Amino acid sequence: MDITQNSVDQQHDLTQHYEVLLELGDCYSSVGNYTQAQQYYEKAAVLAPDEAGPYVGLGVIDLQKNLTEDAEIAFKVACRLDVNCAKAYAGLGLVAQQRAEYKQAFEMYLKCLELDTDNLIALLGLFQTSCQMGSFTKVTYYLEVYLNMHPGDISVMFPLAALYMKDGRFEESKKVLLDILSLDKNHRDAVNLLEEVEHSLAQTKQAGF
Amino acid sequence: MTENYEKITGPVVSVLIPTFNRPQYLSQALASALQQSYRNLQVIVINDGGKDVSAIVNSFHDPRILFINRKENRGKARSLNEALNRAEGKYIAYLDDDDLYYPNHIETLVNALEYKTDCQVAYSDFYKAYCKVWSDGSRQVLSKVVEVSRDFNRFFMLFFNHVLHVCLMHRRDLIEKTGPYNEQLNVFIDWDMTRRLLFFSDFQHVCEITGEYYHPMGECDRISVQRRKDKNEYLRNVLAIRTTRPPKPWAKVEDMSIIFTTEQLDKQAGKTIGSIWHHTFFPYKLHLPLPESDLHRLNTDMPNLFLVPVNPLSSEAQRIDAVLERCDSKYIGIVPSGFPISDIWIESPLYALINNSVAHQGFEPEGSTDRLWAAVVKKDDLQFARSRFPSLPVRESLKAAGIALRQPAFEEFPFQFDNLLQKAQLAEKDGDWQQAAQMFEYIAEHHQNELWMKRLAANALFKAGDHTRAAELSHKINQHRPTVNTLLLEAKVKREKKNFNSAIELLKTAEKILKGPLLDLSDYYSLSRAQVSENE
């Protein structure tokens, strides 16, 4: 037993100041105070120049201000600093989507989801760009993965039900829609889609499938 | 809360600031001492033969400063002794030239010593500030953590230090009892002094953060850290400290005598004596009852040896009786030659004996057998047994006198807190955050050191994904004593719950702590910085 080692914590947290500044940036950004948010992100970037976080924050602010070019630069810097920065790819996806470059947006969202299947922005972005392009193959998979980890997230359940419906997977669509309605019985879109699904199911049965 | 007393007429506190070749930080340190809310100070700056800092010291124009500008480098212990000789305060406080007091430091400790306790020593908590040092010497703080906030534990302090000197204040007259700083030591001169202080007083732990000390990232320039890297020197210093016995009477420590028994002074006996020296940290005297011829052959530097000449034909019991006649210790350890000795070998049974409420009990150390029998007993019990049954061997006489002997149970061992802490930290290391959190909470509830353990529990809970509980615990700590760590944790959870304004408020407090008190050291600081630049 070497109890002399116990006199200090073994793990030294050296990112505290950076984390405080970044959190302040995120909070100010969330309440719409972009001037303060920007100041804190810039301070965080000075303190930890190798961290991607502040650049993601700055990119988000630029997006809010419709400065897509500046946003793109910020997200690219973040990607360069951290090739595994999922949020930066989601940001680049948003930039591309705003420019109606759906293929590029789709790729960025996909890259983000490969790194973080939890990223809701990328997930919904992927769904929206898929709708624009009419290709849904990969979207269904990521929506399912996300829902496995976050069962009950209606914002994702509904697009998944819609995709099942579109793919002719009516039973699965119906099940998801019933789940949505058990969570929120007033979900109008779910009620409407369920009507459509049940109609399609009836037609399928009638046709003898 | 501050007591209602006239600060200027309170007792004088002497603040000792030894400095050596760190002029770039001295002005901040000195300013933090002079800007204390408690004004009745004598601030003694002593230059240990380093770069000239007269201009910096003089720039403060403060009559409370006493500057000793020694030209030769004689070491920190010598500097502190010189400063102590000139100190006039009722109390002594310490500040390194690169550390900082917060403005309430002296007031907090004087308040504790004057009004809240009978202790003659008190200490507070300090932030350890991890920082990046730029080429111009300026420091960029990365984190501030109260790494240790440990309640006073005499047994632990005998083993190793747990109170930083910069956090400490004690009565000056205690130095008359402890003696001055040991100038033969290279490292741990602070532990040597705190260890000696504990013989005469309990320490009051004031759970407030009243300053910060700096830890540069990468290679640390602190002399004490550099010197600890030499393992032989480290061991020499530790042994010197652990065998130091300040002059008696001791108000707070009872002495122990270890009686070493052997048929002959051979190689094995020498080895056992050496092991006792290396592995015993509780204050002791080692009694060697040996024939004159063996005593003459004895060649050792071991301190605290008491040689007791005995008849070469005397039995083991008679030799122990010979020691008993002369020794005044409350506790007696008996150990034969060849006994297996490792760390806390005798302290475990001794700790059990000290804390045992049942009378007439003795404890045997681990490894004690019929052939190699060892024990720790109260001297009174042993004397009683020997006087009643002088013809029996010692062990049998104890039994006959009704002194029960056994090995201590696990829960009677010392360092229960440290054992549990180590296990919790192991769980952390293995990534079992839930288990670690449970253990930290258990320790907080059952083994003191509450704030320290709760902070670790909050951190572990957050990492385990139990953000709600982490926030609750952090909130409780922040209400009592906010730290950067717990403020950040609570803020993160507030943000997750989209309670942004509350999160911002918490984060702003954390940011203020991280920025530190430098903003308040305005005039003194800029003036002294100018002087530093001029000198450089």
Image (cartoon, coloured by chain):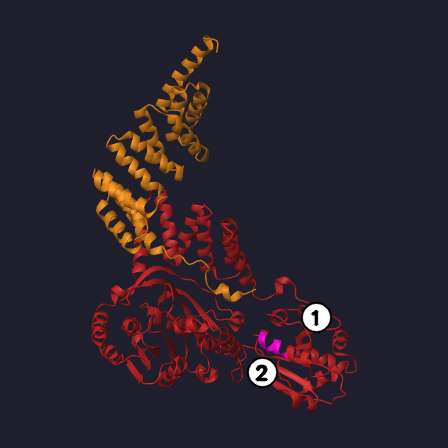
Chain colours: A orange, B red
Read off the chain for label 1: B
Whole-percent x, y for residue B129 in the image = 36, 63
Residue B276 at least partly seen: yes
Residue B122 on image: x %, y %: 43, 72
Compared to residue B76, the image places residue B451 above or below, namely above
Which kind of residue does numbered mark 2 sit on?
Met
Q: Earlier in the sequence, mark 1 or mark 2?
A: 2
- Residue name at image x 21 percent, y 39 percent: A69
Magenta extent: B272-278
- Identify the mark at residue B453; answer none if there is no mark: none
User: Which mark, residue B302?
Assistant: 2
Q: Which one is in front, B155 or B288?
A: B288
Residue that carries the numbered disc 1 in the rendered image: B368
| Residue B534, percent from left and from top | 20, 75
**Helix, strand or loop at disc 1?**
loop
- Side of A127 where B447 appears, left or right: right
What residue appears at the point 77 percent right and 83 percent down from the top-left corner?
B390
Q: Amino acid at mark 1?
A: Ser
Horizontal and vertical percent position of residue B225: 42, 71
Name which residue lies at 36% across and 33% down: A123
Give the chain letter at badge 2: B
- How many angstroms separate mark 1 from mark 2 (CA)? 24 Å
- Describe residue B473's horizontal placement relative to residue A58 as left or right: right
Q: Residue furthest right?
A: B391
Q: Main secondary structure of the magenta part?
A: helix
For this view, does A87 lie left or right of residue B149?
A: left
Residue at disc 2, secondary structure: loop
Q: Is residue A27 visible?
A: no
Number of dots carrying numbers? 2
